[in-house]
Image: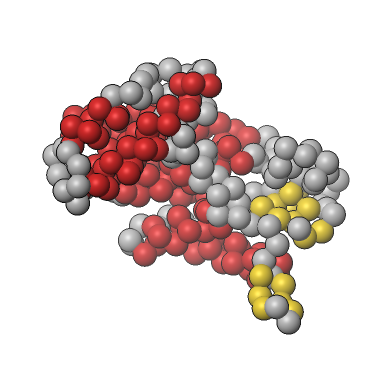
Amino acid sequence: MTTTPPTTLAERQSLAHGPLGIALLHIDRAHRGLTSWQVVHRQLAQVHPLIDGDEAGLFLGAPAMAYVLHLAAAGSTRYAAALDTLDHVVAAHTRRRLAAAHARIDHGRYAAFAEYDLLRGLTGLGALLLRRRPDGDELRRVLEYLVRLTEPLTAPDGRQRPGWWVGHAPTINSAATPGGHANAGLAHGITGPLALLALAKRRGITVDGHDTALTRICRWLDQIRRSDHRGTRWPRWISDEGPA
């Protein structure tokens, strides 16, 4: 495992780039008998050492590899030893990330995409845990964190903001949302946590405040919903400048 990824190392184990992402195609083909599992293994062998620093998440590093091997195993014993090792790595990684997230909330600071979102944050890790260890303590702790994420926070100017308000812009243009924003997207916004909370509930996995968190998110989405002659839609985010 490594904590600071060089660019080429990160690209090799990102689901968006390189051999780890390409392995998903080979896995699908192998399950359908269109290629051999040796092809899959050769593809996966190109991905090492695995990233386990703060950059790691569902789409990068050790958690991404766990997701890919889970799809390869498909309920069989294939890659069982590697998956067992990765399950422990992901659990420890999740606990570290949760500790940092709760410390941030305790200090009254704004969130960041990388803390909670689907691609890099705890929502993505929770989605993986829901597949790999649905009865584990780490999943419940992620759900408890998401409940806390939905609790309103008080901004430095005294205004109430959604708990998932981030202090940065949604794009590389930092001027896009002066003062931060609340994102409504699935990849980086609150609908990612909404989906995970809902999927867990459908599996019978709930924590204290679960339904309250679902209601808070849905009410916020109702508040920002726009309807006109073109139909119903939601803005990508809300900032002090208004919806976008």
- Which residue is at a point 39% across and 57% down the rendered structure image? 200
Q: Residue furthest bottom?
A: 229
Quarter holding the N terminus? Answer: top left
Where residue 99 sits in the image (x, y, percent)? 51, 32
Q: How many labels does the image show?
A: 0
- Which residue is at a point 44% across and 62% down the rendered structure image? 198
- Which residue is at a point 20% across and 47% down the rendered structure image? 34
- Which residue is at a point 57% across and 38% down the rendered structure image? 115
Where residue 196 sits in the image (x, y, percent)? 45, 55
Front in this rendered view, residue 128 or 67:
67
Q: Residue furthest front?
A: 34
Front in this rendered view, residue 183 or 95:
183
* Residue 56 showing in the rendered view: yes
Quarter holding the C terminus? Answer: bottom right
Where residue 143 sits in the image (x, y, percent)? 46, 50
Q: Which residue lies furthest to the left in this view?
A: 77
Q: In this picture, is 131 found above or below 99? A: below
Where residue 12 sits in the image (x, y, percent)? 42, 27
* Residue 91 showing in the rendered view: no
Q: In this picture, is 1 found above or below 73? A: above
Q: In this picture, is 17 found above or below 217? A: above
Q: Which colour scheme is used?
A: secondary structure
Q: In this image, 88 relative to 237: left or right?
A: left
Q: In this image, 140 relative to 55: left or right?
A: left
Front in this rendered view, residue 103 or 82:
82
